[in-house]
Amino acid sequence: MEEKRMNENINPSAPLKPMEITSPRTAEHPSPTKTNEDGCCDVKPATPAARAGQNEENEKTSYLPTIISLVILVAGILLDYFKVDWFNGYVRLAAYSIAYFLVGGKVLLHAAKNIANGSVFNEFLLMGIATLGAFYIGEYAEGVTVMLFYVIGEHFQELAVMRSRRSIKALIDNRPEIIDLVRNGQITSISPQHVKIGDIIQVKPGEKVALDGDLLVERSSFNTAALTGESKPDTKLKGEKVLAGMINLDQVIQLKVTSAYEDSALSKILQLVEQASSRKAKTQQFITRFAKIYTPVVVFLAIALTIAPYFLVDNYVFNEWLYRALIFLVISCPCALVISIPLGYFGGIGAASKNGILFKGSNYLDLMTKIDTVVMDKTGTLTEGVFEVQEIKVTGLEQTEFLALTAALESKSTHPIALAVVAYAGNSYKQKNVANVEEVSGHGLKGMVDDKLLLAGNGKLLKKFQVSYPAEIDSIVETIVLVAINGNYAGYITIADKIKEDAKAAVQQLHQLGIQSIVMLSGDKDSIVQKVAKSLQIDQAFGGLLPEDKVNKVEALKQKGKTVAFVGDGINDAPVLSLADVGLAMGGLGSDAAIETADVIIQNDQPSKIGTAIKIGKSTNWVVWQNISLAFGVKAIVLALGAFGVASMWEAVFADVGVAFLAILNAIRIQRMKF
């Protein structure tokens, strides 16, 4: 519970904060300026230009010093190799010094700033000591090479982060900068940020909707992939809500704006993605704390490696042991860990976003791998939450007439059951004359239809008016509407909530993923709940529950040591969503309560996405531990070789920058995976 609730003070409605990879390295700002409470280094806050991705000209400018340094280094190595006479002494030192400070100047500056701020031991200090030490013993080319490849590693990290951000922003934040506002019959082009709630906007075919609004035309189809990850078009009818980020497919439409620009569903998604990296997984927290202890230990070991042999070996040569210590420092840089692990979690969050799943933090990616019990609400989670007519049984008259009479009476009610009957009947009831309709609370309706006295409701209604009906009807599981005409039983209509298309496949998938127990909780009557559970092959089901009963059930599971994920609609189930180790909200786009309460939001209402979320969590965790193993394994081998004088500075460069580069490539691989 504590693991889940860390950083719970984050407010989803707070202003956007930049997405940051928890690493002290970026190409443009390669240094922290302070130490955070986890004991590692904070990244210097990115500017809006950096968050959005620099333009091509700025990117070329930022890489120019690196390119010049590389050219000078290659030229210097060639001149050394061919032993050119004039390339020696101060000329040689000056050339390599220029190449060095072009790439290493910022690193040394930031190392000095960190020391001034009390953060002495960090990778900038390691790189500074190692490369300046190489210059001291005359290994100019190796000193420049180490710093150059270090900065090139930063550039690769920057590109990886920018690519990850762009892939998400391209998916969910490509809103038009100008929209058409309809006012007094005139169309004006303005920024969507200036549109007010209640204004009318026009959207042409192929355009992306910029603001949430109610549809004012009869119908239109929309591509919802930006919000749900699903390419299947979604048809909206007049009065239904259209969300920012959807693409209009059919015709010119008009919308009545219902949310301000910053409050739209798309803005909330972006907000969640931006803030997700601030909630760190346990592995991230461990690595940042580990780096704070690890770095000073490495520095003191390097000092010991330089000085201790003076007392232990014959023919001690200071420069030889200093060189070994410098190799040791370069190898020991924790770059691969502090870069690739946060980048791996960020990749997992991005992969989830592409699949219509929003994680509020990387800690929930980790928690999804530990889930052994999934508890689900029925209505709106496993079922559509919409009543539909299932069966009609008639006695003594034609079914079409029976349905028309019943629908005519039910048309005077707004109850979901009545609406289901009316929808099923179509237009057949509209010619009927309805009068003197009376709603009998908790029982049903009574009224005159075409001069016939109709009763439509449950068994209690017919018994109240002393109308007998077959006793076996009371054993029917589904919700039922009994109908009597002029005091005689005429038939019944059964109504049930439709099970979602992928609900059964979702349950099977969870079992295949190793979920030990799948439990369904519902406020619906127990007979219906048990029937749904049996058809979906759910392990346990409980019906007739109040919200507090659901809380008690989840608490009982947690007391047994279970790690519980609860899946609900995010509104009625808010208390139990908060109690579970991981709370998942179905269809959270339309619900502020879902966004605020749930830890993971499934945007397209598909239960199968629960299994997808678990798969993404497991894949992310696997990639992160691959990177940890790679970094520690390679470094341990090369450290040992370096200490015994076998490895040179070139092997050290691979152990540091090479491994970091491989780890970055492995981390961004998550977004290419198919789930």
Image: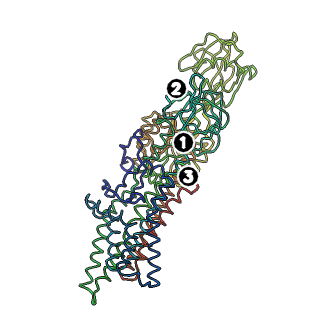
Give the residue drawn at x 41%, y 49%.
Answer: 47
Disc 2 secondary structure class: loop
Mark 2 is on which residue type? Gly
Q: Are marks 3 and 1 in contact (CB under 8 Å)?
A: no
Q: Nearer the viewer, mark 2 or mark 3?
A: 2
Report the mark closest to the observer, 1 or 2. 2
- Residue behind mark 3: 511
Q: Which residue in the structure is indicated by mark 2?
A: 198
Callout 3: few (<14), some (14-19), or many (20+) C-alpha neighbours within 10 Å?
Answer: some
The residue where tag 1 is placed is 603
Q: Earlier in the sequence, mark 1 or mark 2?
A: 2
In this rendering, the label closer to the viewer, 3 or 1: 1
Foreground residue, 400 or 478?
400
Query: Where residue 593 sits in the image (x, y, percent)?
Result: 45, 35
* Type of the residue with mark 3: His
Query: Could you tell me if the residues under marks 1 and 2 are in contact, i.e. CB atoms within 8 Å?
Result: no
> Could you say which is closer to the camera, residue 631 or residue 330?
330
Disc assigned to residue 471: none
Is residue 474 shown above or below 41?
A: above
User: Residue 609 in the image: x percent, y percent?
Assistant: 55, 47
Name of the residue lying farthest toward the left: 311
Disc 2 to disc 3, how far (Cα)? 47 Å
Judge the density around disc 2: few (<14), some (14-19), many (≥20) Cα neighbours within 10 Å: some
Mark closest to the chain's N terminus, 3 or 1: 3
What's the amino acid at mark 1? Answer: Gln
Position of residue 560 measured from the top left corner of the image (x, y, whole percent): 41, 49
State whether residue 426 is above or below residue 289: above
Element under disc 1: loop
For marks 3 and 1, give the CA distance: 23 Å
- 601 vs 278, left or right, is right
Residue furthest front as drawn: 86
First reached walking from the N terminus: tag 2 or tag 3:
2
